[in-house]
Image (cartoon, rainbow, N blue to C red):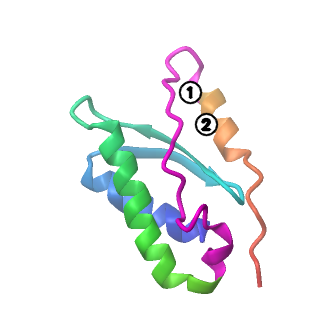
Amino acid sequence: MLDRMKIIFLDICERFEVILEEFDGEHDHVHLMVTYPPKVELSKLINSLKGVSSRYLRREFPQQIEKYYWKGVLWSPSYFAASCGGAPISIVREYIKNQSTPDEEP
């Protein structure tokens, strides 16, 4: 599902003129590093990423995705966003790459 989610996110980011620099996830969350122009409203980007990916993943992986529901929905209504201007981009990129990506399930 993470592979499919990355494809969905790349498509959405392209529509928003956003660059998905890094993507990875664990069983209960994902990390994204994006570069976006000032005209992009971050809340609208996040809402689109969550909404579109939820619709696709529910349709394509109906049985597998049920165990990831949070109060009946796939995504929590919250998100965390931070600017990484103070940290070298290589450190942030490495952190995202080193997530404990779950093994594929049979």
Q: Residue at x 65, y 67 (%)?
A: 68
Q: Which mark is residue 89?
A: 1
Question: Residue 50 vs residue 70: left or right?
Answer: left
Residue 105 percent location from the top left of the image: 76, 78
**Which kind of residue does numbered mark 1 sit on?**
Ile
Q: Is residue 81 above or below residue 2?
A: above
Q: Is residue 91 or residue 84 the one in the foreground? A: 84
Q: Circles 1 and 2: CB distance less than 8 Å?
A: yes
Residues in magenta, as a range? 64-89
Up/down of 48 relative to 36, above or below: below
Indicate yes or no whether the magenta region holds residue 82.
yes
Q: Please state, as top left, top right, bottom left or bottom right, where the N terminus lies in the image.
A: bottom right
Q: Which residue is mark 2?
A: 93
The residue at 54%/64% (across/down) is: 74
- Expressed as whole percent of the image width and height from the top left, the position of residue 67 reads 68, 73
Question: How many marks do you count on the picture?
Answer: 2
At horizontal 53% and vertical 58% (from top left) the residue drawn is 75
The residue lying toward the viewer, choosing from 14 and 45, is: 45
Q: Position of residue 82 (x, y in %)?
A: 51, 27
